[in-house]
Image (cartoon, grey):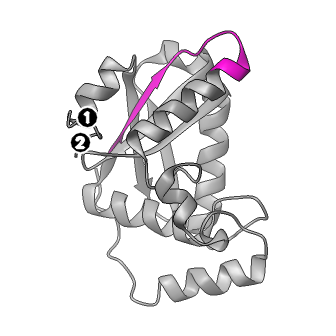
Amino acid sequence: MSTRSGKSESVALEEDGFRRVGWIALGTPSTFSVNFDFDAARSWRNAIYAFRIGGAVVRIGVAAILIQKMVQLEKDLSRALAGEFRTGGPNPWETYEWRRRLARHRVGEFWAQPGPANRALAARQERKLILKYDPCLSNDGPTGRKRPADQRMVRNIATAKATWNELNSDALPSPKRR
């Protein structure tokens, strides 16, 4: 995959100040895990992070403290993968896409960079990067904004569960073991 400038996304991530700090994967039953290979990144503040699966940057975000955000992401996505949706949490479409992509590619790459001291500056930097890469699982990007509202956030839990069941009616194969 390449960015709008035509560079490969891994080269572009490095040029944008990212460092590969770990990896992500699915486990059984229905668990999402974020793994750090570069321990110093755990404590980065206002960190900008990115996930890349199969050569494509799929998510860019900002975290007040990187380890805390990743622990929360593990909990939220694992619950959603088990069909337990919460208002404001990962939506069924997003959860399905995480599972579909990670089932196909086994693991994803976890990239990050320490952010500026000012949270507002970190948010602006995140926004610029989302516009540059247009990750499919970032709801704020051009592609994310084109999705219907129910594919960007959970507002009604019963509707989310029904959508999840519909998306999973032709079940995907279990993720490959690492």
Q: Residue at x 59, y 37 (%)?
A: 70
Q: Specify whether residue 65 is in view.
A: no
Percent across and percent down for residue 102 are 35, 57
Question: Depth check: 30 or 55 in front?
Answer: 55
| Apparent side of residue 172 relative to residue 34 in the rendered image (left or right) | left
**Callout 2: few (<14), some (14-19), or many (20+) C-alpha neighbours within 10 Å?**
some
Q: Quadrant for residue 37, please give it.
A: top left
Nearest-to-viewer mark from 1 and 2: 1
Percent across and percent down for residue 1 are 22, 46
Q: Specify whether residue 156 is in view.
A: yes
Check disc 1 and give the amino acid type: Ser
Provide the residue span drawn in magenta. Answer: 108-121
| Apparent side of residue 39 relative to residue 9 in the rendered image (left or right) | right
Percent across and percent down for residue 59 are 47, 45
Question: Depth check: 101 or 147 in front?
Answer: 147
Element under label 2?
loop
Percent across and percent down for residue 23 are 38, 37
| Apparent side of residue 43 relative to residue 158 in the rendered image (left or right) | left
Q: Residue at x 51, y 31 (%)?
A: 128
Question: Depth check: 42 or 128 in front?
Answer: 128
**Callout 1: few (<14), some (14-19), or many (20+) C-alpha neighbours within 10 Å?**
few
Q: Residue at x 45, y 35 (%)?
A: 50
> Quick check: 66 above or below 133?
above
> Quick check: 23 above or below 17?
below
Check disc 2 and give the amino acid type: Ser
Q: Are marks 1 and 2 in contact (CB under 8 Å)?
A: yes
Q: Residue beneath label 1, please?
A: 5
Checking the image for residue 2, the label placed there is 2
> Quick check: 22 above or below 155?
above
Checking the image for residue 79, the label placed there is none
